[in-house]
Image (cartoon, helix red, strand yellow):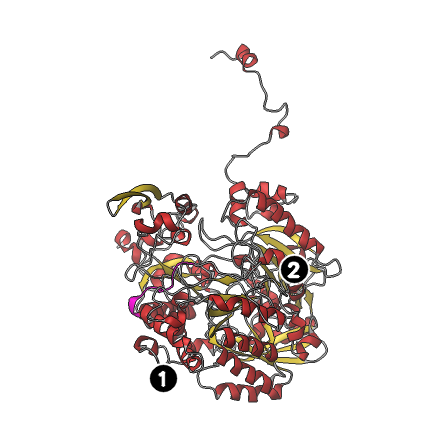
């Protein structure tokens, strides 16, 4: 029996898309605090403003993150959501679950929380929404002792790393995103749980330049798969595409009649570098001109595959707009090996190089991308021990304001103005 | 034994990390990891991945609201137990995926999902509008300028036919962030819905010095619009702050740092629409979303102005763009002046960048197209 009237929210029960309102009502039958979630949300729909108080620092002993405090600003009306803290549980790589594990998490959240979740949070965590302060430690005890699982990150720390599904179910992944994500998550447990950074720091691992986890847009450290040899071509399969026997783009456009597949129009002419052509019915690629954008491979997945010498490109410094505007990650290292044998040492070296510097020079609440902007790309490259190459920019500078260093200029900066005056009267 | 509040550190376990992913991979996935040859979308919402071993994995993708109950998760588990050997996964766009290892298991799974009302619509593949990445909104957040789950439901109800079909020129990624902090990272989406404030913060003089570090609040403003000030509270002079409202860009960073500077407001808050962003490197480089509609009101519960604006942009794009062209690639090919004309969206000064580095977006060429917007010059 509903505890509050929710005439506005009730209008979000109709329609073909899954309704969170119907779902909340169903859950409220066994978790009555869900009526108060609905009640407070209805009030927000009426008032057109949030009814959650600002902040609230709560957590479990020994951790500086993983739990986000939240309190209602109308607790007498909605006592079930007086405390409504969020728990971030570190998701398994690529968000695969056994039902056994998911059911155990559900049971835990039935015992200690509101029964509502986000599957998943934007950074990747399994998010459990709404519990009281006194439940946090008992919840954490059961999570670690019974489920052998752990919290993710929040605050100025390494945020929970995330990855695309990689080689588990994708033919394009150029490295094992799950393994590196898992390995580094374990390697950096301290950095995830105990904030010691100027601000948040995110890792994201995408297996190819299609970038399904938005690493280049959302992570301070983006590892995006690529290859350095030639795209593999199956000429027999090319012929099947040209003959219309295989659907273009893996069937992604089959809902509309776009006409017969035209390899020139759909592949060759859309190649951003124009590095492909047909010789008779053979597809040719000038791989030295290829920038590995993935379009041709996306369109003809049965005919074209990434090369065999695979690794990843490191891009650094993406963030959302607060404060100086959004930034994409900047390409810093064209190619690294992502090698399990060495326990990903090449990747770890790059990460720790960034951290050592950023923890020293980064200002409070400054993302590494902002620190990079403040000091300039040449300085950042030098910190990283990376020789600048033309690949680091889309074009060279168009202003003449070079910061020459004294040792780069013949004779240095020290000069004698008296000597100068002897030859140059004022 | 369980948690003992008198001995909180007794028996404590920390730093376990997540479970190893290999425990959760369905057998067909585990056996063929790294061996996949190609994939195909056999019908909207159903993919097949084919391994070099000849094994096949069929994936059925269904929507979820992201804000979901443990009851619903248990129902997902029931489905996975009945059809998928007890495994399932979630996508980065909040869909749930059920995987089976042979074609004959697909139809029973689809039938099961279909028999559960509107809980698990199948789709979200290929040239479609897939699930909306979004934030918490009024359900959980303390800084939002709009709700998240409600607008998402309203938009997807209206765009539903595009979720379960593949008739668009390319995939269209929609995202919603309920304030400028952009937990939903909408800055690189084909169509982005962004909660925005339009009123400067109020100053709670009575409480500010008790709950805020004043210098931190001053430093939080990227435009230096916050200054120290004296205020009178109950006849006594107290240290406080003031805001130069002419310089405020309503980012809300001050409120993040100082709870005594609230800026949310029923009339001031609403949704801006940005379009043309992309994350993928395919064809063109990743792009930021660009603002095309600076403000639409929070008309609860179904946000009709927002829904119709999104649908309009989507359908004009669907009609006009070339195959494979993302929204941003289309807008750049035809020119943004044509985008505004074709979508019948009035262009105002609000869409001209006047923040830092704005100059890079000013037109410094005579190459432009005449549209109805330039009639005053040409007619």
Q: Residue furthest front?
A: B6
Q: Which residues are magenta?
A: A46-55
The image shows residue A212 at horizontal and vertical percentages of 56, 65
Q: Is residue A140 magenta?
A: no
Q: Residues within 10 Å of mark 1 (few under 14, many from 20)?
A: few
Q: Which type of secondary structure does the marked residue at label 1 adopt?
A: loop
Q: Which residue is mark 1?
A: A1
Residue A376 picture quarter: top right
The image shows residue B351 at horizontal and vertical percentages of 35, 54
Q: Chain of mark 2?
A: A
- Along the horizontal axis of the image, is A95 left or right of B332? right
Q: Which residue is mark 2?
A: A184
Residue A419 picture quarter: top right
The image shows residue B207 at horizontal and vertical percentages of 33, 51
- From this view, report whether residue A401 is shown above or below residue B308: above
- From this view, report whether residue A45 is shown above or below residue A363: below
Q: Residue at x 34, y 42 (%)?
A: B227
Q: Residue furthest left?
A: B235
- From this view, report whether residue B233 is shown above or below residue B195: above
- Along the horizontal axis of the image, is B359 left or right of A168? left
Q: Which type of secondary structure does the marked residue at label 2 adopt?
A: helix
- Along the horizontal axis of the image, is B176 left or right of A185? left
- Tell me if residue A125 can be seen: no
For the residues marked 2 and 1, what is the alpha-carbon distance in whole angstroms? 48 Å
Q: Residue at x 63, y 59 (%)?
A: A189
Mark 2 and mark 1 residues within 8 Å of each other at the beta carbon? no
Which SS does the magenta portion mostly show?
A: loop
Q: Is residue A49 magenta?
A: yes
Q: Say which of B193 and A293 sits in front.
A: B193
Q: Say which of A195 and B185 sits in front.
A: A195
- From this view, report whether residue A20 is shown above or below residue A187: below
């Amino acid at each position: 029996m509903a505890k509050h009237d929710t005439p506005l929210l009730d209008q979000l029960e109709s329609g073909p898309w899954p309704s969170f309102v119907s779902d909340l009502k169903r859950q409220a039958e066994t978790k009555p605090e869900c009526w108060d979630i609905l009640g407070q949300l209805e009030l927000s729909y009426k008032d057109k403003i949030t009814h959650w108080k600002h902040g609230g620092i709560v957590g479990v002993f020994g951790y500086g993150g993983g739990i986000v405090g939240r309190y209602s600003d109308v607790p007498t009306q909605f006592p079930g959501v007086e405390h409504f803290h969020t728990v971030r549980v570190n998701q398994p790589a690529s968000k695969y679950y056994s039902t056994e594990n998911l059911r155990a998490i559900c049971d835990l959240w039935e015992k200690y929380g509101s029964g509502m979740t986000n599957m998943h949070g934007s950074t990747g965590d399994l998010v459990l929404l709404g519990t009281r302060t006194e439940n946090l430690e008992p919840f954490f005890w059961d999570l670690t002792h019974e489920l052998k699982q752990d919290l993710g990150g929040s605050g100025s720390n390494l945020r929970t790393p995330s990855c695309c599904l990689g080689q588990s179910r994708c033919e394009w992944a150029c490295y094992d995103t799950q393994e590196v994500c898992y390995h580094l998550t374990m390697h950096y447990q301290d950095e995830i749980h105990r904030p010691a950074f100027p601000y948040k720091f995110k890792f994201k691992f995408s297996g190819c330049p299609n970038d399904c986890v938005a690493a280049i847009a959302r992570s301070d450290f983006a590892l995006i798969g690529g290859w350095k040899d030639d795209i593999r071509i199956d000429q027999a399969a090319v012929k099947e595409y040209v003959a219309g026997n295989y659907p273009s783009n893996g069937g992604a456009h089959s809902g509309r009649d776009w006409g017969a597949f035209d390899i020139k129009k759909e592949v060759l002419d859309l190649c951003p570098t124009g590095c492909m052509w047909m010789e008779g019915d053979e597809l040719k690629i000038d791989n030295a001109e290829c920038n590995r954008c993935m379009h041709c491979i996306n369109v003809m997945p049965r005919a074209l595959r990434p090369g065999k010498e695979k690794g990843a490109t490191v891009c650094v410094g993406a963030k959302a707009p607060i404060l100086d505007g959004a930034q994409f990650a900047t390409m810093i290292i064209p190619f690294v090996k992502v090698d399990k044998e060495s326990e990903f040492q090449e990747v770890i070296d790059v990460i720790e190089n960034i951290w050592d510097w950023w923890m020293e020079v980064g200002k409070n609440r400054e993302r590494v991308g902002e620190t990079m902007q403040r000091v300039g790309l040449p300085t950042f490259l030098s910190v990283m021990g990376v020789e600048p190459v033309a690949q680091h920019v889309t074009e060279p500078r168009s202003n003449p304001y070079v910061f020459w260093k004294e040792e780069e200029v013949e004779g240095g900066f020290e000069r004698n103005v008296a000597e100068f005056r002897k030859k140059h009267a004022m | 034994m369980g948690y003992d509040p008198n001995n909180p550190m007794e028996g404590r376990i920390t730093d376990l990390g997540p479970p190893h992913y290999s425990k959760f991979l369905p057998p067909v996935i585990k056996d063929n990891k790294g061996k996949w040859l190609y994939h195909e979308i056999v019908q909207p919402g159903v993919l097949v991945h084919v391994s070099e071993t000849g094994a096949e994995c069929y994936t059925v993708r269904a929507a979820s609201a992201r804000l979901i109950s443990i009851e619903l998760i248990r129902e997902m588990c029931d489905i996975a137990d009945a059809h998928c050997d007890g495994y399932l996964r979630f996508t980065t766009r909040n869909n749930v995926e059920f995987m089976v290892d042979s074609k004959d298991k697909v139809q029973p799974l689809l039938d099961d999902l279909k028999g559960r009302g509107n809980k698990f619509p199948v789709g979200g593949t290929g040239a479609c509008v897939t699930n909306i990445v979004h934030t918490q909104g009024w359900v959980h957040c303390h800084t939002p300028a709009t709700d998240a789950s409600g607008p998402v439901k309203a938009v997807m109800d209206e765009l539903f036919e595009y979720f379960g079909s593949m008739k668009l020129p390319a995939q269209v990624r929609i995202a919603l962030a309920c304030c400028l902090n952009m937990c939903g990272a909408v800055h690189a989406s084909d169509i982005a819905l962004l909660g925005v404030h339009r009123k400067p913060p109020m100053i709670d003089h009575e409480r500010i010095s008790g709950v805020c570090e004043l210098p931190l609040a001053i430093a939080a403003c990227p435009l230096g619009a916050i200054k120290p000030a004296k205020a009178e509270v109950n006849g006594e002079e107290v240290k406080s702050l003031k805001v130069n409202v002419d310089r405020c860009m309503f980012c809300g960073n001050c409120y993040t740092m100082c709870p005594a500077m609230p800026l949310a407001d029923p009339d001031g808050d609403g949704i801006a629409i940005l379009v043309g962003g992309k994350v993928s490197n395919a064809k063109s480089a990743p792009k930021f979303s660009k603002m095309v509609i600076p403000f639409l009101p929070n008309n609860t519960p179904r946000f009709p102005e927002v829904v119709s604006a999104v649908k309009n942009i989507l359908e004009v794009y669907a009609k006009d763009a070339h195959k494979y062209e993302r929204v941003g690639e289309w807008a750049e090919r035809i020119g943004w002046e044509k985008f505004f004309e074709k979508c019948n969206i009035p262009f105002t000064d609000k869409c001209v960048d006047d923040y830092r580095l704005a100059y890079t977006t000013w037109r410094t060429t005579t190459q432009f197209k005449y549209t109805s917007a330039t009639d005053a010059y040409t007619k």
